[in-house]
Each structure stands twice: as structure tokens, then as C-alpha cells.
Image: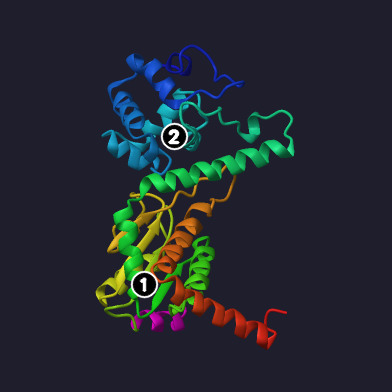
Amino acid sequence: MDATSAIGGGELDEARPRRVSEMLREGFDGFSRSQKAVARYIIDHLEEVGYLSAEELGQKGNTSSSTVVRFAQSLGFAGYPELQRAARDEYRLGATARPVVHDDQMGFVIEEDILTRSLKTDALSLEETISKNTLERFNRGVVALTDASQVLVVGLHEAAVVAQHASYLFELLGIPCSAVTDATESNVARLSRLGEGDVLVAIGFRRAHSVTIKFAEKAAELGATVIVITDNSLSELAGKGDLTLYADIDSTFFAHSLVGPISVIGALAAAVYTRDRDLYDSRVRAVRDKALESGWLR
């Protein structure tokens, strides 16, 4: 079967990027048995395809990674990563949203288009983050943080920004908190002092950093409560804690968006604050008054 039969008679429409599910349904009858298995899985689990390797998708369809790559090419994509991107865009923007326009498909790009596209994607990312979480899990995390003797927030590489923001917010609320952004001995020492009544927040995306995973596993062994923040259930970090909160990180360009993870941290801090506004107001005010008196903020 050639590419034209797979996508319904011709090259991809450059004026309007084709939807992956649409292409698969149109060409389904002409697919081989293994291709049909892969196509059916993509259609039924569109939200997962953006995070599955070719080998993982092949396993879902009981076939090989090479078959998946060739199948993507037969649909008119340069390779499997391009199929992933198209599937992720379709799932994120939905059936009623305007088609995604990638940089290589835009003739004349003006600044407003990039701004609108980026911010709209972030807005959709927040919607996705809301839909992936339950209030019950979120509230359990809030209670654990409120009652914690100390909090250790672990995040490496891009997750380090989120970990540092969490440490800033919880410290302002008077909750002893440290951000761990590397595996130095001092951070390992902090980990070794965790125990029952303490909380470790492990932040990592996609496969997650091995150090973050090890910290989460060790903290659980020590009896600390482990809260995981990751982007999807296929992440190696998912399920490593007492509870998992999800934060979407998709973006329109080369780096992941941290709007979702930072918003989840902000929501946790806000929920802790609302449990005793007077107490936390007094703590925040004391810190800021002291800073003003000393001239640290000048």
C-alpha cells in the first residue's frame, strides 16, 4: 500500500493539516492487519500517542517499531515523530479548534500569530491539567503539605524551576521546605533525614530524571509521604508516590511549557493558605516586614 492510498488520494493538504484520526479512518480498509491494530490504538488512545515511542506503540499493536515507522511514512509523514506531533496537536486542540499551523507551513509569520498560538496552547494545557486531576487526590496532597514537619521538593533540569517556585511558596507560608535540583551530598543528606510526617514532592516529566525517581523511592522507604507531579500516566515517575497529580507540558515550540506544573504548585499553596488564612497571613507579613526593615528588598 502506498502513501496516496493511505491518506485518501494525494499529498497532505498544505493549506489545512490533515487530522490523524481522519486519515486513519479513511484509509483503514486498505491497511494490513498489523497497521489496522496500530491505527485502532491511535484512534482510541490519541492522548497517549504523543508520549509513546515507536517501540511502545508497536507493542500496543502487537507489531514491531519498524512497522510503526513505515506506517507513519505511508501516511505521508517524514517519520514517526511527525505522526506523534500531529496526533498530539489533534488531541490538544480538539475537533472544533482551528487547525494547527506549524512553522514550516507558514509563509509569512507575524508576531501576533506566534503570540496567540503560544498562549492558546498554554490555555489548553491548563484545561488538560484540570481534566487529568481529581479533587480528592488534590485535597489529600493539601492535607499532607499542611501537616508536614518539613517538605523536600525534587525537580531536575526543566523541573528545577517548578521545584524552586514550590520552595518559595511553602517557605513564605512557614512550612520548612527545600528545593532539590541536583544529587549533591547535601541534598542526599536532606533526603536521609526524611521520615514519617514529612513530605517529598517529586516533579518530573515524560520518563523523568533518574535522580528524581530514586529520591521518590527512597523517601517512600523512609516513611515520608510522596506526592508526584508529572505529565502523564506513562511517565516512569507516575505511581511512585502516595498520590500523583498531573500537569500538561505541551507547547508549540522546542521547549516544554511549565504553565501547568507551576499552576498545580500554586493551587496547592493556595489551598494550604485557605485552611487558616489568619495564620498564614501573619507568617507572610512577618517575613515581608522583616525584609523591608532590613533593606533586603531595596
> Is 54 included in the stretch rendered in magenta?
no
The relative height of residue 197 versus residue 263 in the rendered view (above or below) is below
Q: Main secondary structure of the magenta part?
A: helix
Residue annotated with mark 2:
91
Q: Type of residue at label 1?
A: Thr
Is residue 9 toward the left or the right of residue 112 in the image?
left
Tell me where residue 151 appears, x and y as whole percent: 40, 75
Point 43% across, 48% down: residue: 129
Numbered range of the magenta stretch: 181-192
In the image, farthest residue toward the bottom: 294
Q: Is residue 185 visible?
A: yes
Q: Nearer the viewer, residue 80 or 1?
A: 80
Q: Dots 1 and 2: beta carbons under 8 Å?
A: no
- Side of 180 relative to 217 (left or right): right
Secondary element at tag 2: helix
The answer for how far apart the CA atoms under marks 1 and 2 are is 36 Å
- Position of the N terminus, as image quadrant, is top left
The residue type indicated by label 2 comes to Tyr
Give the mark nearest the N terminus, 1 or 2. Answer: 2
Q: Is residue 109 above or below residue 147?
A: above
Could you say where residue 286 lies in the image, as x and y percent from the top left? 55, 82
Q: Which residue is mark 1?
A: 146
- Between tags 1 and 2, which lies in front? 1
